[in-house]
Image (cartoon, rainbow, N blue to C red):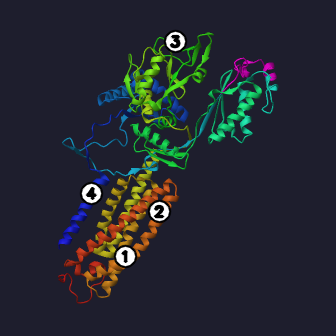
Amino acid sequence: MGRFKLWIITIVALFLVGFLVAFAPIRPVPKGFQVQSTFRFSFPEPVAGAQQDLESASGQVTAELRDKLGDELSYAKFLTPTMLEVSTFAVTEEVATQDRETAFETLEAKYPGVKAEPLPQQGDRPLYTLGNVLAIYPPSPQIRLGLDLQGGAHVVLLAKPETTMSFVGPPERPMVSLTTAEEQPAEGAAAAAEAAPQPAQQSVAGTQTEEEIRRSIIAVLERMGTDPATVEVETISPTRINVVTQAEDEAAAKAQAAAILNYLQNAYPGAKIENDKLDSVFLEKGTAEKVRNVVDRRLYAMSDVREPIVQTQGQDRIIVELPGVRDPERVLDLLGTTAQLQFCLIPDRYEPPAGDGMGKTDYSLWTDKFTRQTVPWKQVYAESKAEFTGRDLKSNARVQPGQGMDLVVGFELRNEQKENFRRFTARSVGRYMAIVLDGEPQMAPVIRSEIPGMGIIEGNFSPQEARDLELLLNAGALPVPLEMAENRTVSATLGADSIRQSLIAGLVGIALVILFMAVFYRIPGMLADVALILYLVLLSAVLSMAGATLTLPGIAGFIMSLGMAVDANILIFERLKEELYAGKSPRSAVVAGFDRAWAAILDANVTTLLSASVLYFLGTSSIKSFAVVLFLGVVVHLFTAVTVSRWFVTMFAHTRYGQTLSHYGVPQPAGAKTGAAPAK
């Protein structure tokens, strides 16, 4: 009987461990609860009808709340015509409570009857705390839900190669006239159109308009087979043009640059490529994985994105799934932002505009100290040199208060660059250094003394903007530009309906299976039902530990695996009944039934495992979810249906009640005694 005790202990231990993993009723004590600073308010009547009116109402309410909450307000938007969601930047529960009351009072004054509503799916709170180590929570499934169940955003990002070419013409002969066609008289515009240069010409007299030279350069590249949609031409100044293409490799980039340069030199002798250098990034092996890592770090740093799924597809696609995200627009902006930080030394001839006296400066127009003319920032930026970039920074950027009430972002250079930065600032005292993020100047201070390797970025940031900049700097810059190839949003309402319907289907399926086994196979069938419950707990635990994402197809695989879990028991019990009909004792029949059914069970399940493997490696993301659940379900039920069920039935066959054939669904022979003591 010692082995029976061992079996019982093993089964109980497996159930307890599986339950603890699958439902996590005991968890570590959190370091501190996340401040819930998002609130919802319901209105007695719809505030708008059409979607456009709803957006207008959201803007009006935002303005009213900002008058009371100021910069503490993050956003306010109508989810439905009668439901408003408000979020603030509260950092403590006390401030969040005060913000909620202020928002409620403001709304109630204009919309009588407004009510505060609880947020759905709020974080779990512990029922009981065991010291400072563990806490007891209400049991809740730990399986990660997919978009079709939880709602959220499905985004496909496309990585693109990029080559930037800067062409400079002779100073005495401008290539481009910055006077637009709209500014010319009608007769002059018509004449200019007739005299527009053609790419096939070997010389060009006079200057061209921005649109004319753009069309000419695109025509040159189009004759080489380049897609015009992948070419951007920007006029920086009358003698400087930037061209951006999506050349796939270095050879293609050089060929494009040579063709453009040949056209410009024929038209404007003396034109050249600035510094004889191309600024290129190409899609190489491992580029998609680097992008995935940067995107993953950005999402991980965002507190309102829970359990994102980031995976690569091929060499240039990154698939991002964001279950339950509240503000998808902000997340998508952060994903697509390159976050390339540069410290640019401004040419000595340029100086920035003066501030407005409120600490705000518009860097779009600069002044040429020699000619006293205004110069656009893009020209200043093109002539500036990036001495250091965001790759030279440590990943410890932080938001901190600046002068007055403004927020700034502090940064620190890597140890190996601190000395270089100190030397650079020491020899550049008196010069302007612009801190540029993705081509836009954030600030342009004068270097007044050497800087040891730490500094701040000012930019009149809102709290949200400052936090986003901190997040981007710490996560790192993208190695290549990204384009959003697909963006689908799944509503939370659809997810709730899917969960409810799937749960009902699963419960009905389990009930029917349990009833069928109990009616047809009596006691062994009831023991198989107990093993089935253990199977459900263990499968949930395995899915949680594996980090699998449960989708609607996954639930289908879950329900399908229920039937397969008892399919093995049906084969075994039918063999068992055959042995009992043949006159064998229950003990012998149990051994023979399991042994003879094993070959058929193994063949059936191996073919299912092979099918699930093919579906996983060749199917789409939804099919993969089905395949994962099906594969793991087969593996788990091979243990519960064969091993655990055998333990249960074997123990029952060794009891006095196990000698009664009717308990196995087999008619008791006439004159046989029921409940006889088992043979020893």
**Neighbours of disc 4 within 10 Å: few (<14), some (14-19), many (20+):** some
Residue at the spot of label 1: 598
Residue at the spot of label 3: 354
Residue at the spot of label 4: 17
**Three-letter amino acid code at the position of disc 1:** Trp
If you read the primary sequence from the N terminus, does the residue marked by circle 4 or circle 2 appear first?
4
Highlighted range, magenta: 167-191
Determine if the magenta segment contains residue 450: no
Q: Residue at x 42, y 33 (%)?
A: 474
**Three-letter amino acid code at the position of disc 2:** Ser
**Three-letter amino acid code at the position of disc 4:** Val
Q: Secondary structure at mark 2?
A: helix
Q: CA distance from mark 4 to mark 2?
A: 28 Å
Q: Which mark is residue 613?
A: 2
Q: Residue at x 72, y 23 (%)?
A: 175
Q: Nearer the viewer, mark 4 or mark 3?
A: 3
If you read the primary sequence from the N terminus, does the residue marked by circle 1 or circle 4 appear first?
4
Instruction: State which quadrant residue 560 falls in.
Output: bottom left
Q: Residue at x 61, y 9 (%)?
A: 372
